[in-house]
Image (tube, rainbow, N blue to C red):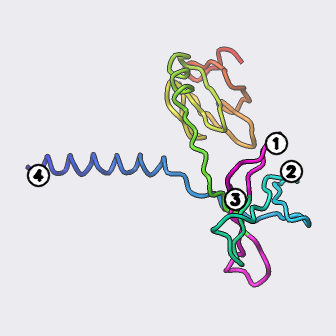
């Protein structure tokens, strides 16, 4: 009986850990607001236009429509901007309130069929049907993704490189 209880507890702990990894935390960072009130990113592209009609807005929270690189504007608020309460100076934070859930089933299937090929999609490493963290071992070598570059055993590679037993087969 005790053995079954321990087995169930271990199973639940593994399931909870895997569920916790799939929950995305809200993206909160310091807001960059132009003089005309538009929200910008680090490259000074407009990513948000103020939504004055959002019913959640008040004197302390502002909501913004989302704008993509092509200039398409969403029909709903994507960002919430508010003052950082922990700061004594006027520092504004932007929180992405619409989290894009990406489905990687297609790339995982492709990775399963492309045996021993390292694939990089959306800054995620896929290898033999699994998602690897940077610094993981793949077929006898270490795969690292840093500064938007992919490395295998210290050698720079590209997505789609085949590896076997720590050796790059093609690249």
Q: CA distance from mark 2 to mark 4?
A: 60 Å
Task: Kindly identify which residue carries mark 4.
Answer: 2
111 drawn magenta: no
Marks 1 & 2, CB-CB < 8 Å contact: yes
Q: What residue is at 69 percent from the left and 59 percent from the top?
A: 79
Task: Kindly identify which residue carries mark 1.
Answer: 69
Measured as percent of width and height from the top left, residue 11 is found at: 27, 45
- Asked whether 152 or 132 is in front, the reply is 132
Instruction: Give the vertical position of 144 relative to 46 (above or below).
Output: above
Task: Kindly identify which residue carries mark 2.
Answer: 45
N-terminal label among 3 and 1: 1
Q: CA distance from mark 1 to mark 2?
A: 7 Å
Marks 4 & 3, CB-CB < 8 Å contact: no
Task: Kindly identify which residue carries mark 3.
Answer: 79
Q: Which residues are magenta?
A: 65-92
Residue 36 appears in view: yes
Label 4: element kind: helix
Please rate how many residues cluster around mark 1, counting C-alpha atoms within 10 Å: few if below 14, some from 14 to 19, many from 20: few
N-terminal label among 3 and 2: 2
Measured as percent of width and height from the top left, residue 9 is found at: 24, 52
Q: CA distance from mark 4 to mark 3?
A: 50 Å
Marks 3 & 2, CB-CB < 8 Å contact: no
Please rate how many residues cluster around mark 4, counting C-alpha atoms within 10 Å: few if below 14, some from 14 to 19, many from 20: few
Measured as percent of width and height from the top left, residue 97 is found at: 62, 58
Measured as percent of width and height from the top left, residue 166 is found at: 58, 24
Label 1: element kind: loop
Instruction: Give the vertical position of 18 relative to 159 (above or below).
Output: below
Q: What residue is at 74 percent from the left and 36 percent from the top?
A: 149
Residue 140 appears in view: no
């Amino acid at each position: 009986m005790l053995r079954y209880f321990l087995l169930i507890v271990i199973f639940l702990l593994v399931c909870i850990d895997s569920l916790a990894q799939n929950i995305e935390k809200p993206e909160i960072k310091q807001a960059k607001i132009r003089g005309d009130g538009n929200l910008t990113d680090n490259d000074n592209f407009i990513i948000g236009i103020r939504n004055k009609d959002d019913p959640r807005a008040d004197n302390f929270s502002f909501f913004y429509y989302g704008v993509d690189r092509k200039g398409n504007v969403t029909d709903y608020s994507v960002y919430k901007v508010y003052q950082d309460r922990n700061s004594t100076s006027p520092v504004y934070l932007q929180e992405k309130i619409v989290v894009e859930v990406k489905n990687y089933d297609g790339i995982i299937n492709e990775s399963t069929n492309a045996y021993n090929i390292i694939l990089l999609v959306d800054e995620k490493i896929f290898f033999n049907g699994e998602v690897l963290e940077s610094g993981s071992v793949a077929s006898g070598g270490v795969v690292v993704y840093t500064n938007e570059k992919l490395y295998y055993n210290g050698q720079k590679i590209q997505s789609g490189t085949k590896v076997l037993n720590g050796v790059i087969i093609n690249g």
